[in-house]
Amino acid sequence: MDNNINILNEENYTKLTVETEKGEKVAEVTTTDATPAEGYHIKLTPRYD
């Protein structure tokens, strides 16, 4: 079993940044980590098959 956590497909992306329309960063997701801004949280739902 592979124990690596691959949140993003690293062949196509290095980082996903979620921002408000005003440019305020809400969250940043890399291939190994998900970091929300203060007051926000991130839910990651795994595949179960």
Image (cartoon, rainbow, N blue to C red):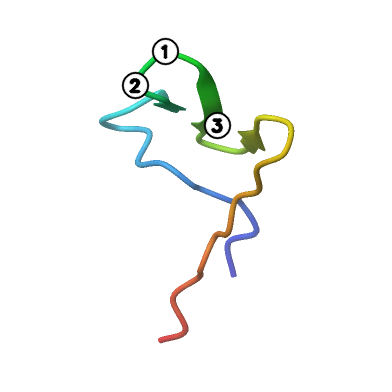
On the image, numbered disc 2 is attached to which residue? 21
Residue 22: x percent and y percent?
Answer: 39, 14
Q: How many marks?
A: 3
Crowd band around label 3 with a 10 angstrom C-alpha radius: few (<14), some (14–19), many (20+): some
Structural distance between the alpha carbons of marks 1 and 3? 11 Å
Look at 50% across and 16% down and name the residue there: 24
Asked which secondary structure carries label 1, the reply is loop
Residue 36: x percent and y percent?
Answer: 64, 35
Structural distance between the alpha carbons of marks 2 and 3? 13 Å
Tell me the number on the disc at residue 34: none
Mark 3: which amino acid? Ala
Residue 34: x percent and y percent?
Answer: 61, 39
Who comes first in sequence, dot 2 or dot 3?
2
Asked which secondary structure carries label 3, the reply is strand
Tell me the number on the disc at residue 23: 1
Asked which secondary structure carries label 2, the reply is loop
Q: Quadrant of the N terminus?
A: bottom right
Crowd band around label 1 with a 10 angstrom C-alpha radius: few (<14), some (14–19), many (20+): few
| Disc number lying in front (2 or 3) | 2
4 sits to left or right of 20: right
